[in-house]
């Protein structure tokens, strides 16, 4: 499939790249936005036009991890290294130097938004940034939608229709949250508030989001998280998330 040369997704990449500049100090060098609808149409923007052009020419949309039916997704964060189909991930790295990425997915009733961030193969440490500062990425998503409003309107007017497949991204959090809470209470003797924080951390919530959902100050939530780290003998939030997923993510 060939994209038209004047499609906004291709001609606006320099503008998107400029909007991404606040994250350049974190070695985040790639960003893409997709708004997928039930009918298979997609509004797309990217910081790398050549990558998107080749993506369609090589028909990667037939197997892309963000190209399934939208009802197969949930709001979540997913590292590209954990995605079910690694071929598109490796293809992006081999041909376009795009690696160590993360998808932030926002599911809505009749559409689904995908925000993808990535670096280069030389910067695997960027994954630690994702885990420790997910709130920065979420804030950037809102910033991008505000600053790129005019581009997004044009992308809506030039939506690209591609077929869906049936291999979505599985939810990154368990469904049996009540059971997890009970296990936490019985095995690790966490307080009620600590259990609530852990449950929300497993859903991918940032400290700021947990603060809002529990109606607590950010400092109080940070205190709870520090206490959890101490009980689980981990040094930072990245290690905490990994340990929580290992203990309670199945």
Image: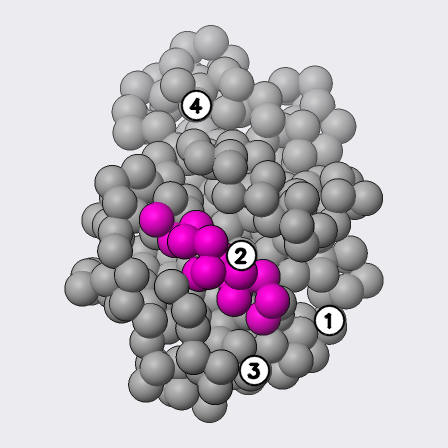
**Residues in magenta, as a range:** 49-62
The residue identified by callout 1 is: 22
The residue identified by callout 2 is: 116
Q: Which badge, 1 or 2, comes first in the chain's sequence? A: 1
Do residues under tags 1 and 4 come within 8 Å of each other at their CB atoms?
Answer: no
Q: Which badge, 2 or 3, comes first in the chain's sequence? A: 3
> What crowding class fits label 4: few (fewer than 14 Cα within 10 Å), some (14-19), or many (20 or more)?
some
Q: Which badge, 4 or 3, comes first in the chain's sequence? A: 3
Residue 193 location (% of width, % of height) = 46, 35
**Mark 1 to mark 4 CA distance (whole Å):** 33 Å
Which callout, 1 or 2, points to the residue nearer the camera? 2
The residue identified by callout 4 is: 249
Mark carried by residue 46: none
**Quarter location, residue 242:** top right
Which residue is rendered at x = 66% and y = 36% of the image?
237
Which residue is rendered at x = 66% and y = 45% of the image?
93
Magenta span includes 47: no
Residue 30 location (% of width, % of height) = 65, 61
Residue 56 location (% of width, % of height) = 44, 61
Q: Is residue 152 visible?
A: no
**Mark 1 to mark 2 CA distance (whole Å):** 15 Å
Q: Which badge, 3 or 1, comes first in the chain's sequence? A: 3
> What crowding class fits label 2: few (fewer than 14 Cα within 10 Å), some (14-19), or many (20 or more)?
many
Reply above or below: 68 against 38.
Answer: above
Which callout, 2 or 4, points to the residue nearer the camera? 2
């Amino acid at each position: 499939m060939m994209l038209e040369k004047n499609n906004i997704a291709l001609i606006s990449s320099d503008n998107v790249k400029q909007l991404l500049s606040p994250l350049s100090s974190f070695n985040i060098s790639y960003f893409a936005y997709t708004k997928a609808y039930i009918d298979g149409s997609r509004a797309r923007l990217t910081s790398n036009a050549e990558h998107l052009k080749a993506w369609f020419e090589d028909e990667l949309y037939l197997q892309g991890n963000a190209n399934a039916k939208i009802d197969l997704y949930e709001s979540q964060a997913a590292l590209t290294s954990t995605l079910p189909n690694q071929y598109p991930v490796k293809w992006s790295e081999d041909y376009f130097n795009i690696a160590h990425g993360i998808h932030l997915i926002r599911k809505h009733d009749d559409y689904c938004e995908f925000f993808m961030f990535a670096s280069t193969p030389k910067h695997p440490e960027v994954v630690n940034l994702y885990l420790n500062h997910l709130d920065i990425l979420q804030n950037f998503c809102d910033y991008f939608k505000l600053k790129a409003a005019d581009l997004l309107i044009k992308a809506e007017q030039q939506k690209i229709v591609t077929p869906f497949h049936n291999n979505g991204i599985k939810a990154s959090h368990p469904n049996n949250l009540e059971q997890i809470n009970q296990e936490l209470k019985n095995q690790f003797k966490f307080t009620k508030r600590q259990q609530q924080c852990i449950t929300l951390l497993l859903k991918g919530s940032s400290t700021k989001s947990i603060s809002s959902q529990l109606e607590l100050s950010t400092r109080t939530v940070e205190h709870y998280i520090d206490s959890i780290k101490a009980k689980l003998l981990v040094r930072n939030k990245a290690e905490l998330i990994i340990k929580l997923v290992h203990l309670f993510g199945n």
